[in-house]
Amino acid sequence: MTLEKIVAITGKPGLYEIVSQTKGGLLVQSLIDKKRIPVSAMQNVSVLNDIAIYTYEDEMPLRIIFKNMAEKLSNEEALSHKESNDKLKSFFSEVLPNYDEERVYASNIKKVVQWYNVLATNKFDFSSIKEDSNDEEE
């Protein structure tokens, strides 16, 4: 399982792994309940490897944030995404101290923490995350 194959689907909770491509979209499997569902090309799908979080300098790729969280937490689950906004912001500032507090909302932090926990529950190998996604040019 790699972040290039893990997606979030707008309007659907949790994360999904791409199983295969179909004529009209994708076939994905939920990381939570392992159910497979088709996703049409009309639905908004975001690949986790392509998502970034605003910092005051630039944007930080989500994969690097996940890697930092895993190192800090020894690959264990983080606090619940249902914690108070203050606790979530405090935790997130430990993982990404220079995140842009005006453009990164508590709802964004909740989503990142929730996604990290889904991956940690599924024993995702955070050490396999590459710092630079351009390593895989073919």
Image (spheres, rainbow, N blue to C red):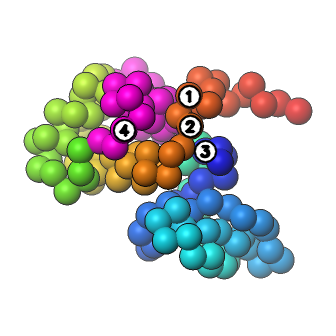
Residue 44, position as x, y percentages in the image: 56, 67
Local crowd size for mark 3, using a 10 Å CA cut-off: few (<14), some (14–19), many (≥20): some
Residue 108 or residue 117, whichever sits in front: 117
Residue 30, position as x, y percentages in the image: 54, 68
Amino acid type, residue under disc 1 in the picture: Ser
Residue 60, magenta (yes or no): yes
Residue 130 or residue 127, whichever sits in front: 127
Mark 3 = which residue?
3
Q: Are marks 1 and 2 in contact (CB under 8 Å)?
A: yes
Rendered residue at 56%/28% (across/down): 127
Residue 80, position as x, y percentages in the image: 24, 51
Q: Are marks 1 and 3 in contact (CB under 8 Å)?
A: no
Residue 79, position as x, y percentages in the image: 23, 44
Measure the C-alpha gap from mark 2 to mark 3.
Answer: 10 Å
Rendered residue at 57%/57% (across/down): 7
Q: Nearer the viewer, mark 2 or mark 3?
A: 2
Amino acid type, residue under disc 3 in the picture: Leu
Q: Is residue 55 left or right of residue 102?
A: right
Q: Is residue 19 left or right of residue 3?
A: right
Mark 1 = which residue?
127
